Amino acid sequence: MEPAVNPILTFEEVTRNFGGRDVIRRLNLSVFPGDCVGITGESGVGKTTLLRLASRIDRPTSGRVLCSAARPAYVFQDMRLLPWRTASENIALPLQAVGGNKHEARRTALEWMARLGLDNCADLYPRSLSGGMAQRLDLARALALEPDLLLLDEPLSAIDPERRASVRGILEDLILRACPAVLYVTHYPEDMLPLASRLLKFTGEGEVRELVGGRTGE
Amino acid sequence: MSAFDADSPSVMPPSPGGGKSSGLYVAAGILFVLLLWQGLSLLAGDLAIAPPAAAFKALFRMMGTPVFQRHFLTSVWRILLSILLGGLAGFSLGIIAGLNRRLYLFLEPLRWTLMSVPPVTILVLAMLWLGLGGRMVVTFASLLLSPVIYVNTVKGMRLVEKSLVEMSAFYRFSLTMRLRHVYIPALTAPLLAGMAQVVCGGVRVIVLAEVLGAGLGMGAAIADASSGLDTPVLFAWIFVSVCFVAVIEYLILRPLQARMLRWNQP
């Protein structure tokens, strides 16, 4: 008999209210290692709020969020790159924060930059990068950590169509290989449907509906 | 009126760009100041305002003398020391107050008092407590400079983008990493912009303190020239103090600003 697997992320009766309006209402959700949870819905209905709660950047109005991830990573919608640090430093710093050696962190950073087509950008500052390059840098920063919990907020939105497929392939490859728990927010379900074991739809007024779809046999 | 105005606009605006035309405008501005000086001297008389030629003659005469060097270097040392001491106190308290609202509120009455009390009052008290001389001069100047740096630092801390603070907290940056990679780089631009004010202010308060309470330094030399009605020497020292600030701003602060803010260059 296989030992029970504990969820890596749990929302217990979580409500998040902004200015009298429930963006998320009494959400109960457990995410297990290997789960890929797709999250869709119109703009402003609470998708990013869910990720902010999962990442502990934000706190629920009521209820609680439990997270046991040892190496969480977040691909931010607004990238949040340090403008005064080079591209490679932006990737290396989170690796150093979790105890990585400076040289190894830089080596890992350069490897991921090469994988995501940012080979010649190591010493450039974020100001010199295009929107698509900056987003790939944000992605590289997250993936380089080899996370056990991956929070993705529109990770491909700024990437040009030519590169989108290859970057999506890299993302899919990592998710299938390393099996982190994934929360994937996107306006484009086709980006994550091949991977998603679950699909949540934010319908507005705090309601979250779980749709059936995505990978089978999980 | 305080010797400083922490809220006054930066005196280090972005460079309009290089080239011959910029240099011509600066040269024209310098010429205008000299002509204005000459005109005022003609109007008021040589005794009241020494003409430029007489001031420069006095300057060249005194520059090679050991007395000039002693006065000048004494003031330079005091200016740098008071900027360092005032800067350390203002910067470190500003960082902590920027991170801790309670400390910020606790320090507000002290900050307000130091910035509102007329500088000459603080100078008189400093002379009473510390006597005359360099220690009093540096203590006085540091007391006046530290709130300016403190205010600039606290303002800078408030302007640090919340999104970057959140990112660094999410990725578990230690406090040292957050200070080194988020807060201090974010503070660089406003602090460097404020440094020109601090240097100008430092020169003014040091000279003020030396006029009244020291036997050595530019201020002491100005006091001697004034009591002897030697206005060419007086204006020569004024010119020296202006040049000192210009050298610090254009040869040190601006290149430093360009180097430290290169990430912001297109």
Image (tube, coloured by chain):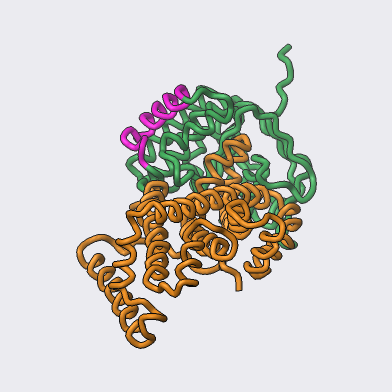
Chain colours: A green, B orange
Q: Is residue A49 left or right of residue B191?
A: right
Q: Is residue B9 left or right of residue A218?
A: left
Say whether residue A76 is magenta. no
Residue A148's x, y, as percent? 60, 27
Name which residue lies at 38% across and 54% down. B254
Residue A9's x, y, as percent? 69, 33
Residue B113's x, y, as percent? 71, 65
Q: Is residue B111 left or right of residue B234?
A: right
Q: Quadrant of residue B154?
A: bottom right
* Image quadrant containing the C terminus of chain A: top right
Does residue B182 sit above or below B189 in this rendering? above
Q: Quadrant of residue A132?
A: top left
Name which residue lies at 39% across and 70% down. B235
- Which of A88 and B113 lies nearest the eye of the viewer? B113
Magenta-colored span? A103-124
- Which of A155 and B192 lies nearest the eye of the viewer? B192
Farthest bottom residue in view: B43
Predominant secondary structure, magenta span: helix
Residue B124's x, y, as percent? 67, 65
- Which of B7 and A200 lies nearest the eye of the viewer? B7
